[in-house]
Image (cartoon, rainbow, N blue to C red):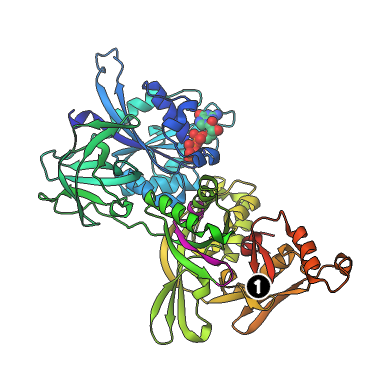
Amino acid sequence: RPPAATRNFSIIAHVDHGKSTLADRILERLGAMGERDKRDQTLDTLELERERGITIKSTPIRLEYTRPLFEDGTGGETYVLNLIDTPGHVDFNYEVSRSLAACEGVLLLVDASQGVEAQTIVNAYLAIDNNLEIVPVINKIDLPAADPEGAAKELEDVIGIPAEDAVFASAKAGIGIDEILEAVVARIPPPSGDPEAPLKALIFDSFYDAYQGVILFVRVLEGTVSAKDQITLMNADRSFEVDKVGTFTPGLVVGEQLQAGAVGWVAAGIKDIADAQVGDTLTGRERKTPEAFPGFKPAQPVVFSGLYPTDTEDYRKLRDALEKLKLNDAAFSFDPETSEALGFGFRCGFLGLLHAEIIQERLEREYDLDLIATAPAVVYRVTLTNGDVFETQNPAEFPTRDRMTSVEEPYIKLSVMLPEDYVGPVMGLLQERRGSMVTMNYLGKRVELVYEVPFAEILYDFHDRLKSISRGYASMDYEQLGYRDGDLRKVDILVNNEIIDALAVIVHETKAYALGRKIVDKMAEVIPRQMFPVPVQATIGAKIIARATVKAYRKDVLAKCYGGDISRKKKLLNKQKKGRARMKQIGTVEVPQEAFLAVLSTD
Ligand code: GTP
């Protein structure tokens, strides 16, 4: 099929603006499966995604669209439309940008009752950076609160997309779908590229198949790829022989070849997903393209947390489960780690908090594990007094003040969209999180705030706080900015006078006291009473900054034990402990999972 009849596009939107609904509606219109109940076979696949209503993995679909015959004699041509789905969360923005790089255009969807939100702007700029044609679609015009013209005007004011270009639609009611399809073929340019040139194909996603190895999702930019070709992955510098190629309709359909302009899949017996990372370029082993597709970034975890089995017997089971998850996820990392308090476990790296939550939930549900997770941490860069620089994401390894000359921490550029009524409180929150303002843009009755904020400051309860002080109206998105100096300290937590390594946190000097207070109070609340009073302390170096006490059982509980009989006493206490899951025995004290996340508690 000549490339001129192809359109490669994607739908981008703020969360809940109706991306999946529109995709389903387009599928339905073009005779592909589109009913909601068949959805698990089409765009959103993971169970978790459906529950949370968000898209994590992107899956392309190849559709055929035949234009209607118009009165002026035009129409009737058939096009191949490759619809490339994109993940809908900031943790996966790199994947989004690579998926977009596989397209020539996007449908930028805006909810007519909500208007432009933070992710609308970020996604629109990802599309602009990739030189894509943007077709603005104002969705949900069926809603009584819809203001389609207002939303179109906002797009023009904020992003500079002419309001008259907007297509008005309702994905739910099936309004405007024909106009959208016509806009796709009329406005989005066909792919270019020479099928005779050396192969150049961009990997925009991949997954691991137990029989065929890693399946690469590719956009062929130049040249042609077919079975038996010898290929090289340019950034990984690994070579393979192609087993099969094909397209998506959805599901994998084997084809003969993929030519410049095509979107499809390649299986080449690749065993390790780390060799086939998103953003890498496929080329011929003998006939190489002069330059790889620009912008490759190896998947790099930015948030780390320790995962320990509650039952030490489950260590191997946990390791096997992590290995299985890793097969399908190059962005996830894990390394064995030992904690004095928690025993053997793993230090795991994630793209963000949502990614961390997804992995942890899958471990518990699909692999039936009970886990203790330590508080998430970012990667700090420490310069020691001897001049050495080292990076650490483990607070337990963070040096004391006298051993280092400086520390740097990662910053993000955060944008928040909100109604002007909430600007004051939200600015207060950002200030409290050590943010500094970059810009503030008024847009009718709404405001976009752009701040530079330490990444660690939004890891904890930031999103919840933002939502609650803006009554749900604020939306946010962010990108990583790089490292800045910070006056950071390690706060240790002691239970019964012993340092619990897994509870250490890194915090800015100005916040150390308040955080220490919060953690010890929370711990004193969640640690069950023991036979003796248990002191809980927060320290910086040798200095105690906060303390609290878990009171002992009241005497009458133990009075029944006739004093001396230790074994009876133990029996009684053990009985009371029964049924409390996720406890970890630390020395003589039992500490529940909640305690390890005391730092995350909002109250
Ligand atoms: P993510 O996958 O999380 O990015 O969300 P999404 O953008 O795919 O949103 P989704 O399609 O799941 O739609 C969100 C909600 O809006 C759902 O409850 C839809 O039924 C509803 N919705 C989508 N399109 C329309 C529309 O045109 N009109 C109305 N009234 N509701 C709509």
Which residue is at the front of the view, 524 or 102? 524
Q: Is residue 176 above or below residue 529?
A: above
Please tell me which residue is depicted at 26% across the width and 25% down the height of the picture.
Answer: 79
Count of residue discs: 1
The quarter holding residue 259 reads top left
**Which quadrant: the C terminus?**
bottom right
The residue at 62%/52% (across/down) is 422
Crowding at mark 1 (Cα within 10 Å: few <14, some 14-19, many 20+) = few
Q: Residue at x 48, y 52 (%)?
A: 355
In the image, 296 versus 132, the foreground residue is 296
Highlighted range, magenta: 340-356
Q: Is residue 506 above or below residue 465?
A: below
Magenta stretch holds residue 350: yes
Tell me which corner region of the image, top left, top right, bottom left or bottom right, holds residue 228. Answer: top left
Q: Tell me where residue 159 appears, x and y as whole percent.
A: 41, 45
SS type, badge 1: loop
Q: Is residue 315 above or below residue 383?
A: above
- Judge by depth and name the residue closer to the eye, 461 or 305: 305
Does 206 sit above or below residue 566? above
Three-letter amino acid code at the position of disc 1: Gly
Residue 201 placement: quadrant: top left
User: Which quadrant does the N terminus fall into?
Assistant: top left
Say whether residue 453 is visible.
no
Horizontal relation, residue 19 to residue 474: left or right = left
Residue at x-position 43% and y-position 50%: 325
> Residue 591 location, x and y as percent?
67, 65
Q: Which residue is mark 1?
A: 587
Query: Could one spot residue 396 in this view of the protein?
Result: yes
